[in-house]
Image (cartoon, helix red, strand yellow):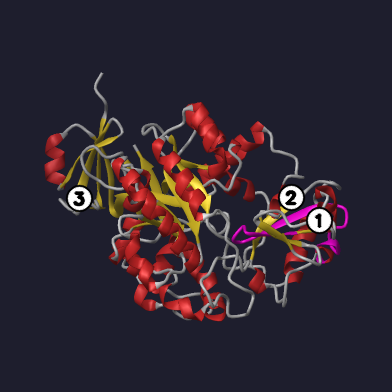
Amino acid sequence: MTQPLTVIHALTLTLDDARPEAQAVLVGGGRVLAAGSREEVGALAPRAQVLDHRDLLLTPGLAEAHIHLVTHGFSLSEVPLHGARSVAEVQARVAQRVMNTPPGTWIRGGGFLLSELGLSGYPSAALLDEVSPHHPVLLYSRDLHLSWANSAALRLAGIHDGTPDPEGGRIVRPLGCLLEHASDLVARAIPVPTEAQYLAAARAGADDLAARGYVSAHTMAFEPVEAPRALQTLAQRGELPLRVWACLPHDRLGHARALGLARTPGGLFQWGGVKFFADGALGSRTAWLHAPGFADGSGTGMPLDPPDLIADLGREAIELGLTPVTHAIGDRANTEVLNAYDRLRPHAGARGIRLRVEHAQHLRPEDVPRFRGLTASVQPIHLQADGPMIRDLMPHLEGLSYAFRSLKDAGAVLAFGSDAPVAPPEYRANFAAAITRVDDSGARLAPEQALTELDVLHAHTRGPALAAGWDDEGIIRPGARAAFTLWDRLGGNAQALVL
């Protein structure tokens, strides 16, 4: 039996240099068969079903290049703290949840910015105790590199004044906040989600993205391995509405080897990357900086995975066909990751793997050309909140913070995401931030780094596809996956169309 054919009538941006625009696209068997004028395509399939979207714009499907997809799904039912501008506002939102939660049950939330709480230092457990003395509470900052716990949560985790800092983390004194890996001490005290809960969160996160117009996502390895496995299960059941490229944490690389996991293109779920963390984040002052460091005198941040480890385990990942994917925020972190990647380039090139730097947020001029041929997986939406902090904490790095234009001109492949639940998976904010460079203060951060609308479209479609090694996605040409996004205008309202 022959596959049914469908013709889409719409003004089409193909991102194919051979034919950048079209008026119709022919689809069959889940693949693009042709793109051209309505007359050309109609002649190829005169009896095909026609989808008339001539009032809309058709592009390759939106991709979310950096998300914690299952954590995002869980976050949809947690206390939302985005936009909380004071401790009192955080307390009010937690108190509301306490009223509707059985005593002793954990309360989780996230999305606050330390810089917006109106404090001169870190918030204490006592501030949360005021509204939740009997429910353990764990709240994550927007960047997920700092958490804030109440006394009940700290007790359950066994944390007291004499508890030593864990490797790669810091317990802030007076007690209440935990930086980097110290947050794991409390997180481990929370009951482990059941398989059913992981599946429900995976479904919620994926459905939310699909409803926003996305057709694919790259999910990172901040989450337990059970999270991507839940996505894999949904794919096997035919219940996953997105194509997913998933990362393993580097400490599970041996596990991947034992299971024979490798880059296996095809289907809606793929193990694709191995994740490393070179440093922390700007908001928690754990981004790793070259001297002079932060302007407030708080130091030069916190290095995490050593460069030699990234190079050594990165080589093992490449041998398995997996992509090294490294988080680097500060300029020193980016320098050290690039040094490690210089050792990996020959091996990655031989396997057709494009090395990835996640965030690439603050750079030195001499490091920008070193990104040639790499993926710079960046999140323009973060520019909006970070702009004022950059001017306050690292004014010497302002010109090459969120340096999208410089990275593109250097030959890096830009791949846009949100890092949800750090920020909402909102492509509109990425369009606005990358094009206007306007931050939350109303000022423009390094306006010379601005991109065009078409640049942003490429970074939200073709760029992520190239980063994942998916030559059949992010482009509209014969043989490509029939996964599109329809727009009322580019960067406006969007809906996914997967045939």
Do labels 1 and 2 touch, CB within 8 Å?
Answer: yes
Specify the amino acid type for callout 1. Thr
- Separation of marks 2 and 3 at Cα, in angstroms: 56 Å
Judging from the image, what secondary structure is the residue with disc 3 in? strand
Q: Residue at x 49, y 52 (%)?
A: 308
- Nearer to us of marks 1 and 2 is 1
Q: Residue at x 35, y 72 (%)?
A: 450
Q: Is residue 48 visible?
A: yes
View extreme (top): residue: 1
Any magenta on residue 128? yes
- Mark 2 is surrounded, within 10 Å at the Cα level, by few (under 14), some (14 to 19) or many (20 or more) other residues, namely some
- Separation of marks 3 and 1 at Cα, in angstroms: 65 Å
Residue 31 rendering spot, x and y as whole percentages:
27, 35
Q: Is residue 210 visible?
A: no
Specify the amino acid type for callout 3. Gln
The relative height of residue 118 versus residue 250 in the rendered view (above or below) is below
Any magenta on residue 324? no
User: Which residue does the numbered mark 3 point to in the structure image?
Assistant: 23
Q: Residue at x 53, y 69 (%)?
A: 289
Judging from the image, what secondary structure is the residue with disc 2 in? helix
Q: Nearer the viewer, residue 148 or 216?
A: 148
Image quadrant in which the C terminus is located? top left
Specify the amino acid type for callout 2. Leu
- Separation of marks 1 and 2 at Cα, in angstroms: 11 Å
- The answer to whether residue 78 is left or right of residue 313 is right
Instruction: State which tag comes first along the sequence, 3 or 1.
Output: 3
User: Which residue does the numbered mark 1 point to in the structure image?
Assistant: 163
Instruction: State which tag comes first along the sequence, 2 or 3.
Output: 3
